[in-house]
Image (cartoon, coloured by chain):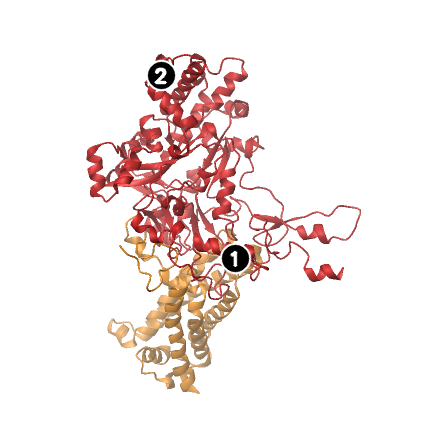
Amino acid sequence: MRVMAQMAMVMNLDKCIGCHTCSVTCKQAWTNRAGTEYVWFNNVETRPGLGYPRRYEDQDEWEGGWVRKSNGRLALRAGGRFKKLFSIFSNPKMPSIEDYYEPWTYDYETLVRAPASDTFPVARPKSLLSGENMSIEWSANWDDNLAGSQDHAATDVMLKDIAEKVKLEFEQTFMFYLPRICEHCLNPSCAASCPSGAIYKRSEDGIVLVDQDRCRGWRMCISGCPYKKVYFNHKTGKAEKCTFCYPRIEVGIPTVCSETCVGRLRYIGLMLYDADKVLEAAAVEDDHDLYEAQRSVFLDPNDPEVQRGAEAAGIPLDWVEAAKRSPVWKLINTYKVALPLHPEYRTMPMVWYIPPLSPVVDIIRDTGHDAEDKGNLFAAIEALRIPIGYLANLFTAGDVKPVDSVLRKLAAMRAYMRDINLGGAGDDAIAEAVGMSGSDMYEMFRLLAIAKYDERYVIPTAHAEQAHALEELATDCPVSEYGGGQQDMFGEGSGTPTPVAVENFRMLQDRQTADDMPANPMKGRVNLLNWDGKGRPGGLFPTKGEEEER
Amino acid sequence: MDTFLWVVFPYLCLATFVVGHVWRYRYDKFGWTTRSSQLYENKLLRFGSPLFHFGMLGVVGGHVIGLLVPSSWTAFFGIDDHLYHWIAIVGGLAAGIATVVGMVILIYRRRTVGPVFSATTNMDKVMYAFLGAAIMLGMWNTIAGSLLRFGGEYNYREGVSIWYRSFLAFQPQAELMATAPIGFQLHAFVAFVLFALWPFTRLVHVFSAPLGYLTRPYIVYRSRDTERLGSTRPKRGWDRVG
């Protein structure tokens, strides 16, 4: 047994209202730079829908993740080491910018400078890549709320195996939102695909990171990740991905996406797992067994043997304590209501989801029946094979039994709590029908519905003796050591690294309080998303001199 | 003049090459990348890039054999000059044509595809000029010099190659270069300018060829960097305690 700790997340999809606050705050924190315009470490997809990038789940096309070979061992779906090196000059499976979208801005200058005329001036869209006029045909969230679903969502990869007539009816039947970040997998295929070895999994907390100093831009991680959550910064020529906000996690505060989540649907906590068992579990023969196999890798922090193993592995005591209180552990293992996203990619993802009951509830309510009655809900779960088959394609490699079980628990909780809210004592028979006790059910309700900040985010800090140099606490004298040299000489972004936290904050502060812009950082482009309201990026307004001439 | 051209200047370029790489690596690890533009455009790159790069690997291999292996060694294995040159010309032409075709496709792509063109730095343009010139001069030497025998016969293995080895041994024999045909002289001169530019261009990615990938484990685990936990290096006198 080799005990390792993993920072993990669970999202309760029933509570997601699709507001995209997580995406926007994440973008403001991490990817509001030139070169990452199209990069969304966090995005929210409407399902059924195509996802981002388009149809990323079609691994027959993209060849991400792992496959089990006939000899029972795992291999990268896109081919082994020699094939990777042989195709290094042109990665045959890399998505092009069209599969994401071409980032753009608008020619606002025209609005101000156009001469008086009968027609109103128009700000035309300009590509942020080439600066040319472009027509906007796609973006990160084009099929939001099933927009254009007749054309787009019908080609959702997850609708495979679901009958043709269903496809035509489905948008009347169900819809939900799926927020996605990097899965910080236990067996990350992006890291395995990286020729330079620049992508690593932190041994302390399992966060998967790209070493920006070692990445050489070979692009194999981008095609290797089946979730397409590694992005290519086209200005710096390096791969970038969700960092699980590690500078925040290290000091015990949740990720930006979780912190700002309006629905409070995200849970962060530790999972202890047995690193020796990961490969074995990822290589089980039947795709349907992968969910259970991954659960079997996790270790119970209350087990004394596990605690001794954790101590031997150098995991601090307060981390084990945090693992005991972990809401993620409860949702995955105690209540068994959280499921992994696409276990069939065999990467052992560590961001799990509680599948939504709301599509089922909505249908019952719309038909005029009591949507909180246990009998009605159970019958509906039986009858609504379509949404459940679809959820199973997402979360259990197509096995409907676990999804069925989770939805029954959620339905039972609904009925149980209705009883209590109407003054009843709580009908334990309802809980027992889904294999839970009444008190467990109440505890689960508390965690899912009203858990406070400290219960939703149980994040042990990195250790105090290391605190001196943690990003958010840095006690070094932050006299600038960066920004020297001519950054343009080798292309944008070259030079000594831009720090992620405190120093960056100072730089931003300097920028925001400065009188004028330092040497036009936006390279003549205007992108309102990147613009902090200070200074005047070229082209946004007429120059001062011209104003005075008028 | 010969001493400057074939002794002083090449050593200056070599020194720039070596020191430049050390400096660049220390100063600019973050900028050390292929700067791939595949995200912008894939259809042309799909053909151009493998043609160019595999061709280039062949060209480099040919240069290693031609410049570093003395005639006496190949003669020892029973390869006479005639056979050697036949092999060199066939191999060189194949690799050279692949390189040139690939380069033409890539330069055409770089110029005509908007996003790729606007991502091209000035340093890239300078580098392309010298790289292109070196390749074209090399092709000229192969086709006009060795194949068509313009301007008489010249066996570079008795001239340029010996000079190059003497140069690497720090006992340069400039006269061997001074008597070489102008095509070879120009090729060598342009190549040395390219070597001097090398550390300051995207060509540095050549030294990152990820051969370690073949032997390392798939998943890399790394501990949080205890040497340098923060994003700035601790200052002297601010060493961490504990």
Chain name for mark 2? A
Question: Which residue is painted at 36% across and 34% down in the image?
Answer: A343
| Image location of residue B143, percent across then percent down | 45, 72
Q: Quadrant of the N terminus of chain A?
A: top left
Q: Which residue was labeled with disc 2?
A: A431
The image's mark for residue A510 is 1
Q: Quarter holding the C terminus of chain A? A: bottom right
Q: Residue at x 42, y 76 (%)?
A: B188
Report crowding for label 2: few under 14, some 14 to 19, many 20 or more residues within 10 A (C-alpha).
many
- Residue occupying the point 34% across, 74% down: B67
The tag on residue A470 is: none
**Above or below — where is A120 with respect to A386?**
below
Q: Residues at marks 2 and 1, common chain?
A: yes
Q: Quadrant of residue B189?
A: bottom left
**In front here: A31 or A190?**
A31
Q: Left or right: where does residue A193 sit relative to residue B41?
A: left
Q: Earlier in the sequence, mark 2 or mark 1?
A: 2
Chain colored orange: B
What amino acid does circle 2 point to? Ala
| Closer to viewer: mark 2 or mark 1 | 1
Marks 2 and 1 close (CB-CB < 8 Å): no
Q: Is residue A30 visible?
A: yes
Q: Amino acid at mark 1?
A: Asp
Viewer-side residue, A229 vs B66: A229
Picture layout, residue B62 above or below residue A143: below
Q: Colour of chain A?
A: red
Percent coordinates x, y for residue B204 in the rendering: 41, 64
In this image, B210 relative to A12: left or right?
left
- In the structure shown, which secondary structural element does the residue marked by tag 2 occupy? helix
Question: Pointer 1: residues within 10 angstroms few (<14), some, or many (20+)?
Answer: few
Asked if one can make out residue A1 in the rendered structure from this viewpoint, the answer is no
